[in-house]
Image (cartoon, rainbow, N blue to C red):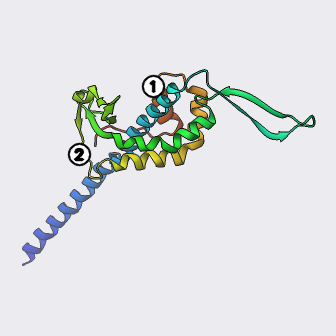
Amino acid sequence: MDKNMASRGGVVRVLILTAVLVSCVSASKPPKSKVVRCAVCRSLVNELRTAILEVDPRKTIEVGSYRIEADGKQKLSSVKYAGSEIHMMDTMETVCQSMKDYAQARHKETRKLEAIKLVENGNMNPRMMEYDMVQDPDLNKGLEFHCEAIIEEHEDDIVKFFKENGGSSLPDLQEEFCGEVTSLCRGVKDEL
């Protein structure tokens, strides 16, 4: 009986050691939601940049104070609408609804997780063949949720960032905003 107890104690120690090792290994990997938030951030930047580029660059709006000066006039100035604070606020109200048209996919060559648009200009995304779709138990509703959370947490950052950097290239915008401004992609490994 003592021999049997000793072997059980050894088995228990091995199981505990295994559990500790497994928890250490899984703790070193970023959680799936962090990787997804990074992918959503990159897609959000794409959507916001597209919204800015779609506006007629000649369109302007008057901004200024509602205060009336001593001479009875308001102090107003004209600014470009594209990328303005008003434009960004209007766009942020609806941009996350576009995430319904996105799905999680892994690029076949780089193995990088991305949130890709399924339909572009009324047709299936021609780049779909470059990706393996990732099964999402939430049926991609998580993409919209993450988008809304990013906007809620970084609303002021978004307005300021696009006001200052709206004309930059998409990869530069994604890297700067998702990596530096929000840190959503900083240190994220693309493996699930």
Image coordinates of residue 64 in percent, x first then y, are 76, 35
Image quadrant where one finds the N terminus: bottom left
Name the residue located 56 percent from the left edge and 23 percent from the top edge. 56
Name the residue located 75 percent from the left edge and 28 percent from the top edge. 77
Per the image, the residue denoted by label 2 is 135
41 left or right, relative to 63: left
Residue 93 shows up from this direction: yes
Image quadrant where one finds the C terminus: top left
Q: Nearer the viewer, residue 16 or 135?
A: 135
Residue type, mark 1 in image = Leu
Q: How would you rate the neighbour count of disc 2 (Cα within 10 Å): few for under 14, some for 14-19, many for 20 or more? A: few
Furthest-right residue in view?
70
Q: Nearer the viewer, residue 11 or 146?
A: 146
Residue type, mark 2 in image = Gln
Image coordinates of residue 46 in percent, x first then y, are 44, 31
Image coordinates of residue 177 in percent, x first then y, are 50, 33
Q: Nearer the viewer, residue 94 or 177?
A: 94
Residue 186 shows up from this direction: no
Per the image, the residue denoted by label 1 is 170
12 left or right, relative to 43: left
Name the residue located 48 percent from the left edge and 45 percent from the top edge. 150
Which label sits on residue 123? Answer: none
Q: Is residue 16 above or below residue 127?
A: below
Question: Dividing the picture into quarters, in which one does residue 159 lie?
Answer: top right
